Amino acid sequence: MPLVRRSILLSLAGAAVLGALSCDNSITSLEVLPPLDAASTDSSAGSWQMIVLSGPTQFTVAAPAAETSAAYLAELGAIKTVQANLTAAQRQVIEYWSGGGVLRWNEIARGLVARFSLPPAPRADGTYPVPDPENPFADPQFPFANPPYAARAYSYLAVAQYEALKTAWYWKYQYHRRAPAQVDPGVHALVPLSNLPAYPSEEAVLSAVTVELLKVLFPAAVEEITRRAGDQRNAALWSGKATASDIAAGLALGKAVAAVFVARAGADGMRTAGGTPALWKALADTAIAHGETPWISQETPPRPPMLPNFGLVQMWLMTPTDGVNERPAAPPSTSSDQMRDEVAEVRQTVDHLTHAQLAIAQKWNDGGGTYTPPGHWNDITTEYVRDARMSEVRAARTFALLNMAMHDAAVGCWGVKFLYFNPRPTQLDPEIKTVIGLPNFPSYPSGHSTFSSAAAEVLTSLFPAGAADFASMRDEASISRMYGAIHYRSDIERGKEHGARVGGYAVRFGQTDGAN
Amino acid sequence: MLLAFVLVTSLSAQSLDDGTLLARRALGVGVSYMHEDWSQYWEGTLKRSNGNVGNVSTQTATFLSAYGVSDRLTLLAMLPYVWTDASQGVLHSMHGVQDVTVGAKYRLLSTPFTDQGTLRAIVVAAAGMPASDYTPDFLPLAIGLGSKRAGGRLTVNFQAHQGWFLNTSAGYTWRGKVTLERPSYYTNGQLYLTNEVKMPNVADYVFTAGYQKGRLCLPLSFSWQNTLGGGDIRRQDMPFVSNNIDFTRVEGMVMYTLPSPRDLSIRFGTSHVVDGRNVGQSTSFSGTLFYLLPF
């Protein structure tokens, strides 16, 4: 073979191999969280305003044994034994949880929502089974963690964690027991320690309150949840942060607080949020009686609307009257010139979509099988909490304010959606096709716009330096629904205004809760 | 759910997995058109239909060219334009330039084998990458998977003097990670908090038997594709770019070189997926015109 041809062949083969090698396949799948070294211990958090509990003494934590007691010395000895034989796997568990329990549980919750945010598949006869909390492992799995379900789930976790941690902080500063690594130089501190008292252990409080709620919200994931909760407590022990009695006290406190929230969740209206066939028909009949075109499901086979009674679910910071008062006005009539123009705008937009607009539609899609729009805002918040080096209790406050606002926004938005039962653009103009999945519930107003606006209000109050970013993300998330061809402009505008009003309740709560 | 994600297999006689090469300094150009559709697919291993997409069709028009550097080395290039459409539901159709693929086929061996015919061994190196900024994150209607690829292939061919031939080919394709527009995704039992998707590599095998005499060639192929990793489509979920896509396909073709104009060959082919995982059960029909320039 002539030299020149051999060279061509070899260079081609070489290019192919280099091309393959340059396909760097490594990716980072978890939040990158350095070991939490909180900017402040927030020692006054025991006096911050409660939301559901009557106060930090609603649950009593008994006094711990003295640091000089035989029982406590035995606990120290046990930690030293473990630390002398730490495996690589145990060190990994310590490192993972050192990033912060609130942040890690938020990340885990987002994973659970993404795992469960798929709708039931239709039966052969064209009907849809309903996920059954009594049989969560069946097909369909329970729950279908759609956006309202997810908003509620994130909020229960966040508020319960926050109330439990405020209670823990109160008792920590009643007893002032130090961390084992501070009591005994023979115990190593494998994570950053502050002068935050160790009893009851905040890790144990968090693990217990979280696991009890997750078992109710995502019962089919009980095995993973239980394992992770055990990991978190072990990490506290192995790292020299808490002794067995610190952990036992935290575990008991976390469980006690969780019971309050589990009871609330059982009676907050969620159980009947799915409605009945009679209700579904009445919603359409009401719209027709008002001279409007009613929403219909555009799935094949047609699927019952998503949680038509979610608008009746109990809110965190708003009364039912507040909820009604903050609602936006009616959408333009389906037979109005304005609606005709808005339909035309959607069609014009999606049929001439730029690459940048498609990218925005996909970035904020947050549809089936994802952590949903509320999860997206938790994702955004995580980096701000991490960078602010917030204590566990302040991180919990941040997520509680954020997720109470988004839950109340979901309730408010769903109330309006099913009040007007307004059709989607694809229903009023069948030529309109979407570049993201079409949600199976009425159009007006846009849920993503409502969530995003409520979230941006809260985050702006907590992280003023990020105000411009939050506003631009809110606007991008909102308009993404027009690029996706699933919402009209008035859905988006009224949704944003509504979300901002709802978010204001959490902002005002945060201004006077004693944490500033 | 497209099948066109391995380094294009059986496009024409001048494809990456056949046993033939061009003569030295021969330059060929061609166009092909393929229509492919499915109304059933495998959601993981569960075969089903989906009223929200109905029948999903893909049309592909491909420009191809090949050049014989020597009697032993042929270079190839291909560039497809793809249109997708769903017959039901509200999802928008997609179209655009998909991935450019370049390859080199080199004949390692060509020797008389028994007194019946000739044995050839051919190696192929090929690489491909998206040639436009199409989105891979809209399956099953995305026009491609959006990853860079590089692969190798070994083909062994036995051509009998009487006309029949046997061809076996095995390929391996490395695939680079894909970048999505969204900051997270869930696949294979895990939430990934990144916009980057690790793409599993792909192995494929093709076994062809056929008859070639004079101007006529009639190949019949079985091919297997095995994606080496990736997750299943979850119950009632959309397909995802890194899904574990496997399939078995049968394909038949008729190729004929016209007496006039000289060196113009036409091909018609059809294929059908008989078994699969995370893929549509597609049936395709294709036609190709390939012209060897008088050069």
Image (cartoon, rainbow, N blue to C red):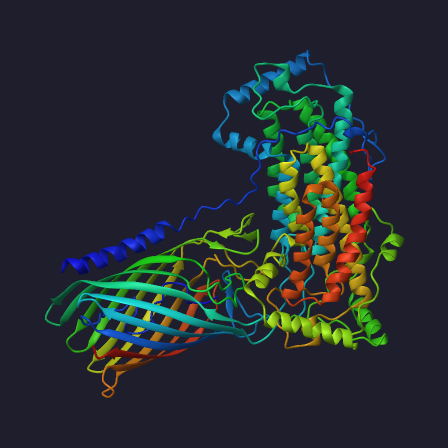
Q: Is residue A135 left or right of residue A511?
A: left
Q: Is residue A383 above or below residue B228?
A: above
Q: Quadrant of residue B91?
A: bottom right
Between A38 and B253, the residue placed more toward the observer is A38
Q: Considering depth in this image, is B133 or A167 the residue closer to the camera?
A: B133
Q: Residue at x 65, y 35 (%)?
A: A388
On screen, residue B257 versus residue B95, left or right, reads left
Seen from this angle, which residue lies furthest bottom?
B260
Work out whether residue A202 or residue A333 is closer to the camera in this orientation and state it: A333
In this view, B194 is above or below B65: above
Q: Quadrant of residue A287?
A: bottom right
Res. A300 in view = no
Q: Position of residue B129 (x, y in %)?
A: 40, 61
Residue B95 drawn at (x, y percent) = 50, 71
Residue A449 image point, x, y percent: 72, 58
Direction from residue B70 to residue A28 in the image, left or right = right
- Image spot of residue A151 (x, y percent): 72, 51
Q: Which image quarter is the C terminus of chain B in?
A: bottom left
Count of number-bearing discs: 0
**Res A411 seen here:** yes
Task: Indicate left or right for A265 with A185 as reference.
Answer: right
Q: Residue furthest left?
A: B115
